[in-house]
């Protein structure tokens, strides 16, 4: 491997939505940083099988639906 071309690889803490934490090694952030997850396998409907509602941040979903309302989806 070439020297001095790879990012620093260090340990961070990942905090899940339910408050549990685990340590992992990554190039994200700095040594000792905490990554707070908004979506993870304990809360996302793709893993839990539940019905999650889509958040309309800034009216984007509404704008999309209005733009394509005549296509008959």
Image (spheres, helix red, strand yellow):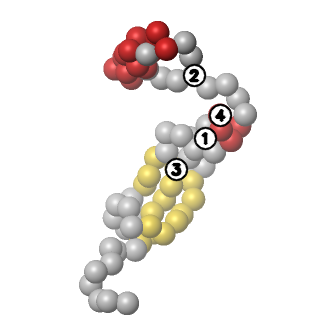
- For residue 25, above or below residue 13: below
Task: Give the image location of residue 63, x and y in percent.
Answer: 37, 16
Q: Which residue is mark 4?
A: 45
Place of residue 16 in the rendered image (x, y in percent of width and height, measured from the top left) = 56, 46
Residue at the front extreme, as displayed: 71
Task: Work out whether residue 73 or residue 27 is closer to the camera in this orientation and state it.
Answer: 73
Say whether residue 19 is visible.
no
61 or 72: nearer the viewer: 72
Position of residue 33 measured from the top left corner of the image (x, y, whole percent): 39, 59
Residue 5 badge:
none
Direction from residue 23 to residue 59 in the image, left or right:
left
Rendered residue at 72%/34% (across/down)? 49
| C-alpha separation, residue under disc 1 versus residue under disc 3 | 8 Å
Q: Is residue 43 left or right of residue 30?
A: right
Number of residues whose C-alpha sits closer than 10 Å to that of mark 1, classed few (under 14), some (14–19) or many (20 or more):
few
Q: Residues within 10 Å of mark 3 (few under 14, many from 20)?
A: some
Q: Residue at x 63, y 45 (%)?
A: 41
Q: Dot 3 corresponds to which residue?
A: 15
CA separation in Å, label 2 and label 4: 9 Å
19, above or below 23, in the image: above
* Distance CA(mark 2)–CA(mark 1): 19 Å
User: Which of the two discs, 4 and 3, sits closer to the camera?
Assistant: 4
Residue 51 in the image: state x and y as whole percent: 67, 25
- Callout 2: SS: loop
- Residue bearing the label numbered 2: 53
Distance, label 3 to label 2, CA atoms, is 23 Å
Which mark is first along the chain, 1 or 4?
1
């Amino acid at each position: 491997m070439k020297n001095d071309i790879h990012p620093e690889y260090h340990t961070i803490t990942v905090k899940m939505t339910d408050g549990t934490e685990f340590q992992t090694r990554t190039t994200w952030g700095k040594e000792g940083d905490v990554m707070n997850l908004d979506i993870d396998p304990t809360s996302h409907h793709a893993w839990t099988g539940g019905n999650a509602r889509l958040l309309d941040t800034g009216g984007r979903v509404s704008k999309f639906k209005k733009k394509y309302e005549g296509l008959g989806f």
